Amino acid sequence: LSPPRLRLPAQACRASTAHAAAAAPRGSVGVMSRPSAVLAALALASALGSGLGWGRGGARGMEMGVRTRFRDALAKRLEVVQQPLDDAALKEGIAGFYDESSSIWIDVWGEHMHHGYYPPGFNGFFGTMDEHRAAQEDMIERSLAWAYGPNASPPRSMVDVGCGVGGSSRYINRKWGCTTEGLSLSPYQIDRAKQMTEAAGQEASVNFQVADAMAMPFANDSFDFAWSMESGEHMPDKEKFVRELVRVTAPGGRILIVTWCHRELKPKEEKLKRREQQILAAINKAYFLPEWCAVSKYEDIATSLGLEDVRTADWSEAIAPFWGAVTRSALRPRNFLRLIRTGHTTFKGAVATPPDAARVPHRAGEVRPCYGASARGQEALARPDGRGAAC
């Protein structure tokens, strides 16, 4: 029987409304012992057997049963420790991860390599691929609307920092006609971005290159708009990252950072709970991320750099269903076999994040994978030094 689900209307997915995000990581990465393909397959078999047998009832019960037991079975076979990575090793790991995993992602998900934005109550585990892809486009629309509002003039030039295979660059170029420069550490992603852009006939105004977001190959004041969609979490030095975005953004321009962050610490807390640190260590290892930070750190950095109209938002609930979809896509026989063939790095990325932690953010002992944002308001405000950009 097909379990009930809330379907996402295509028009609602593509409607322009308010949205965006900000926050990110810091400096050590969790390291796991390498599981073999055989152990990974056993973990899946064990998870499926126990999850389907002991689900809590209904569609949500089966979803949480499969996903939780899949994760727990794999976790028992993986030793999670903390080990710092220097910048060179981190960049090499990021490039290798996306070189290895991007082909299967494109085949399953298409050109957009980021979360979707979903209505309340949407069950990501049982959503269709059309619904998820529409939600990914809605994420772009909501981010642009949140950053610019209904009355601001669109940018004439844009830099896409951590562009993936160029999905956002092409989408925004089609929407606003602005010239776009995209950059990524992954040669594979850049090659595919160029191929897809030529196929779409947009190569005259949309360009891509392999480059480091912490030292971009652009002159000062090169762009009206700096767009960072889920790349800030890879940056080991958040202040240096934001400072570089400010450098390349022209006076009166805007900066939008959509990224992953952990919850705010409570007044007497000095660090996250042990369970939360373990969850993040597993995610860090799978995705080659440095240590996470709260959204308030980005806000503090933006303010300290003199940016104006600094705003943040938490969209955690709206993006949480996406992890159910990623888990389900990994469980499909064809995709699972491809994951095994592609390599352990891609496999870990598909199952690393516990979706229930995002779905139930206040559960004791679980991390809240915040999805924060910051950007300029609807009115163009100049910075005191005349360079006006805001994060």
Image (tube, helix red, strand yellow):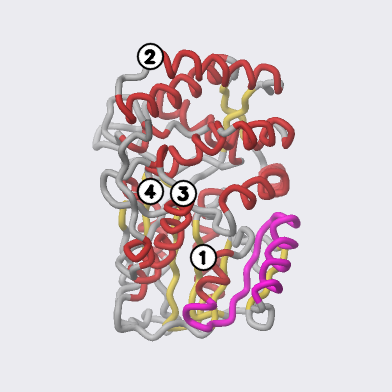
Q: Earlier in the sequence, mark 2 or mark 4?
A: 2
Q: Quadrant of residue 181?
A: bottom right
From mark 1 to mark 4, how far is it between C-alphas?
27 Å
> Residue tagged by mark 2?
54
Of the two numbered discs 3 and 2 in the rendering, the one whose residue sits closer to the viewer: 2
Look at label 2 and name its amino acid. Answer: Trp
Is label 1 in contact with label 2 (beta carbons under 8 Å)?
Answer: no
* Proximity of marks 1 and 4: CB atoms separated by less than 8 Å: no
Q: Nearer the viewer, mark 1 or mark 2?
A: 2
List the residue tagged with mark 1.
Answer: 243
* Residue at disc 1, secondary structure: helix
Q: Contact (CB < 8 A) between labels 1 and 3? A: no
**Amino acid at the residue labelled 3:** Ala
Task: Return the residue found at the far front.
Answer: 1
Which quadrant is home to the C terminus?
bottom left
Distance from label 1 to label 2 (Cα)? 50 Å
Sequence order check: which comes first, mark 4 or mark 3? 3
Q: Is residue 199 magenta?
A: yes
Q: Is residue 209 above or below residue 91?
A: below
Label 4: which residue? 319
Residue 24 image label? 3
Q: Height in image: 37 above or below 141?
A: above
Q: Are marks 2 and 4 in contact (CB under 8 Å)?
A: no
Nearer mark to the viewer, of 2 and 4: 2
Structural distance between the alpha carbons of marks 2 and 4: 27 Å
Residue 151 occupies quadrant: bottom left
